[in-house]
Each structure stands twice: as structure tokens, then as C-alpha cells.
Amino acid sequence: MSERQYKNWRSGNVKSHPRTTAALVLERLFPPWTIAELLAPPRTVVPGPGNRRRQPHVSAEVDIEIDIDDDAVEAVQFAQAAAATNVHPLVLDQLDADTARLADAYRTRPSAELVDELRAGRRTAFRLIEGRQYPRQALRLHLAAARLCGLAGIIALDAGRQRAAADLVRTAELCARLGGDPLLLAWIRAAQSAVAYAERRERDAVALALSGHEFLGGERAGTVTAVRLFVMEACARARIGDTPGTLAALAAAHSARQRCMDEPFEVGVFAFSIAEQEGYMAGALLDLGGERHAQAAIEAARRAVTAHAATPAALQSVRDLAAAHVVLAAALVRFGEPLAAARQLGYVAELSPACVRADTRCRLVGLAALPLDASAPGARELLSVFDALTASSADSDAASTAGPHS
């Protein structure tokens, strides 16, 4: 077919019809028209369902009616596509329920028991997001994916897998932004601060914790997530020796605690109980050093242990309770009370290594390195507990290194 012939056909100047093969090609290239319709004079044929023909010399009113009909057909086709969804409401409800159950189970069960279920839920959310759903359903799916990724990030952090934790929490942030939940974004900022703290990037941890408050305007400022952000900031400042900044952040945490209100997803890992708050605060005070701060750490750690003990066993956060016992033991050793410290560590020694966070294990290592008078009462008991904890920690590290974690 020559260019000249094509231009003649296009302008309506049809002198000869194409051969059969060419006609089939043209019909294939310009469906749903037939070759007769393609070569008809301009404005006599319009595309659309049923290949409706226009008769030559029709009036302008008829032209408009036909255009409106075509617009209606397009609208119907769009509506049919928009109404299509691969997500049943019950599927979303079940995904939310599974997420809440896993977040709650994190408190009391070893992480290894949650990984498979968590991965399955996350993959389900991702697969559904890649399909078609209503806008409101898409928001719920992205928020479910954000919470599942956030929980997986915390589990990775507990296992000492900081890089995996950073990747998971970063994905959680993206999903939370697409889901449009400022409160969840603030919680994710706290998780990112914890990751930076674990990676010894204390100044980044401070900056991330501070940036989380940007999502907590208005009434959201009175939530446990605000308390968590202040506590994360205090922990990071304490490690770099910023005493005024640490004490100011702790004071802000206490103030925010007084204004706390319930949060829609305050369950399991997303909650931040008084016991957990006191445990983290005790760690920050202990890291500041000095007798006065160590004494304040002892008091905070004891409040944490007492609050945990008052919590029903089915709701106790074993990881946070273990951390509080270790902080209390470390402070007692500094005050020359190895026997009391050994009693605190006895609880930790009875736990599964999988229920002891990586940061708690690091504090145990630092505690074992403290100078200790072997002839002091209780020193032998304390050293014996250290040996048991070191052995179980080594076994846990070896197992986590050998097995995949996501």
C-alpha cells in the first residue's frame, strides 16, 4: 500500500478498493469497522457498540444525539470497570483481625512462632493491593500492610537484624502514607528511631523521634504514641551523654502520659503500657550515669516490674519485663548489690532466648563487663547467672543466623 493511496482513502477519495489481504489487515488494525465502513465518506460512520451507522446528510441534532449515546456507553463501561473488585469486605475484616491478633501475640509468644503467619498476612495484603478494589478498600489494605510490615520490622529488630528491620519499617511508612493514617505514621517514626538507635546512629534516632510529632497535631498529641516518641528521644540522647536533653524528653513523656487517650490500634506491639514506658525510662536514666540517675533508674525499673506483675499473665510483655529486670540488675550492681542483681537476672535466665530482645542482650553484655568483687556476697550467684545467660544468648544468636528472617 502506497502512502499516496492511504492519503486518498483517508480523505475519502476512494478510486479503488484494496485487495482482500490488505482489506483484512485494515480491518484488523481498525476494529470494529469493516472495510466498507473504513472507506466510507467522512462523518458517515462512528465507532462504538453495535457499529452504529450514520446516514449521510443527517441533521446536526441527530449528530448530537449519537455523540451523547456514545458518551453514555463510555460512562457505562467505566462504571463496570470501577465496580470490579477482588476484595470482599469479609476479607478485609479478617485481615484486620489477624493483624490485631498477631500484634497482641507478640507480647507473649516467641517471635519464631509468629513469622510464618505474619509473612502470609503480609503477602495476602500485597497480592490484594495489586488487584482491583474500591478506594476505601485500598486504604484499608495499605494500612493493614503497614501494620504487618511494622510488626515484622520490630521482630527483626528484636533479633538483631537491623538492616531487615529498616527495610520493613520503610515499606511500612510507604503503605501508611498511601493509607493516609497520621497516627500510624507517628508510630512508624518511633520504630525508625529504634532502628537508628540499634545501629548506633543516635543523632538520627533523635531526629526521627522529633519528626514523628509532626503527625500528632491536635488531639493526637495526647496519645501513647506521643509518649513513645519522647521516650525514644530520651534513650538516644542518654547514650550520647545529653543529660539536659534526656531529662527534658523524659519530662515531656510524663506530661504526655497525663493526656493520654485510647488509640484505634492500641493493641500488642502498637500499645505502650505504663510498665513498658517505665522500663525504657529506666534504661535512659541508667545510661546517663551517675549515682543520682542510677537511683532514679532503680525506682523506674521497680515500677516497671511491679506494673508488669500486676498485668494478667496472658497480657504480659515478656520482652519488656525481661528488659526491666536487666536494667534493674545493672543499676543494683553499680550500687554494690550483686545478690539482688542475681535475683533479678534469674527471671531472665528462665525465659526462652527468643523472648529476650537484642538490645537487652547488649545490656547484659555490658553488665557482665562491669567490675565485680568476687568475694562480695552474691557475687558467685551473679556470675553463675551470667554464665547461663551467655550460653543461651550464644545459642539464640547461632539459631537466628542460621535461619531466614523476614
Image: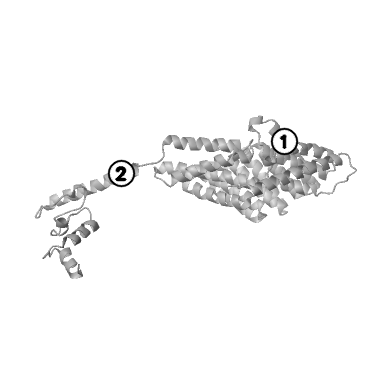
Position of 171 with respect to 373 (left or right) is left
Mark 1 residue element: helix
Q: Amino acid at mark 2?
A: Ala
Q: Quadrant of the N terminus?
A: bottom left
Image location (x, y in percent) of residue 291: 81, 46
Image location (x, y in percent) of residue 225: 59, 42
Q: Which residue is mark 2?
A: 79
Neighbor class of circle 2 (other Cα within 10 Å; few <14, some 14-19, many 20+) is few
Q: Nearer the viewer, residue 333 or 128?
A: 128
Label number found at residue 247: none
Q: Amino acid at mark 1?
A: Val
Model colouring = one colour
Label number found at residue 305: 1
Q: How many marks?
A: 2
Within the image, what quadrant is residue 79 found in? Answer: top left
Using the image, determine if residue 350 lies above or below residue 359. Answer: above
Position of 301 with respect to 379 (left or right) is left
Q: Nearer the viewer, residue 113 or 44?
A: 113
Furthest residue toward front: 21
Furthest residue toward right: 375
Image location (x, y in percent) of residue 315: 63, 32
Separation of residues labelled 2 and 1 (CA atoms): 59 Å
Look at the image and tell me whether residue 183 can be seen: no
Viewer-nearest of discs 2 and 1? 2
Neighbor class of circle 1 (other Cα within 10 Å; few <14, some 14-19, many 20+) is many
Using the image, determine if residue 231 lies above or below residue 42. Answer: above
Look at the image and tell me whether residue 130 can be seen: yes
Q: Are marks 2 and 1 in contact (CB under 8 Å)?
A: no
